[in-house]
Image: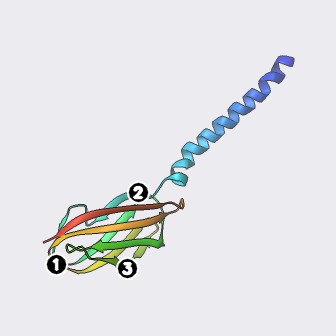
Amino acid sequence: MTANRHLLPAMILRRIALGLSILFFCCGGQVWAHAILMGATPAANQLVARGSTPVKLRFNSRIDGKRSALSLLAPDGSGRALAIVQPAPDTLTATTGDLTPGYYVLQWQVLAEDGHISRGEMGFRVQ
């Protein structure tokens, strides 16, 4: 009976550790993951037609559209903010307005559900 008393705390600690490990692996990816860009329109280095270009960015997690930003850098180096629409919790859309030929850079900054800010940029070319 005395030997079993010493084993009981070790068994409880192992079960707690196992439970925490399972919780971490099941939920940890969503709780601690930054927003990662999963898909974009236009795609990186895509050649698009002259005129207005629709923009769509889809992320791997929910993002706060009100605290996110999209901007467009023109070939001459000037930049402007794009008005964001959030059709889904993981997606931002915008319209560029009329674009002339050249290389443009779309810059994004999003606030993920985990409270972390992610930033990135991607270029595309207008015919």
Mark 3 or mark 2: whose residue is earlier in sequence: 2
Q: Quadrant of the C terminus?
A: bottom left
Identify the residue under disc 2.
36
Residue at horizontal 14%, vertical 75%? 101
Q: Is 121 placed left or right of 89 in the picture?
A: left
The amino acid at mark 1 is Thr
Q: CA distance from mark 1 to mark 3?
A: 19 Å
Q: Is 125 placed left or right of 82 in the picture?
A: left
Q: Which one is in front in this view, the residue at disc 2 or the one at disc 1?
A: 1
Mark 2 or mark 1: whose residue is earlier in sequence: 2
Identify the residue under disc 1.
100
The amino acid at mark 3 is Ala
Mark 1 or mark 3: whose residue is earlier in sequence: 3
Asked if labels 1 and 2 touch by Cβ distance under 8 angstroms, the answer is no
Q: Is residue 46 visible?
A: yes
Q: CA distance from mark 3 to mark 2?
A: 21 Å
Crowding around mark 1 (Cα neighbors within 10 Å: few <14, some 14 to 19, many 20+) is some
Q: Is residue 1 visible?
A: no
Q: CA distance from mark 2 to mark 1?
A: 30 Å
Residue furthest to the front: 77
Residue furthest to the bottom: 98
Identify the residue under disc 3.
83
Q: Is 24 placed left or right of 127 in the picture?
A: right
Instruction: List x then y, in percent, for residue 71.
Output: 34, 73
Residue at horizontal 69%, vertical 37%? 16
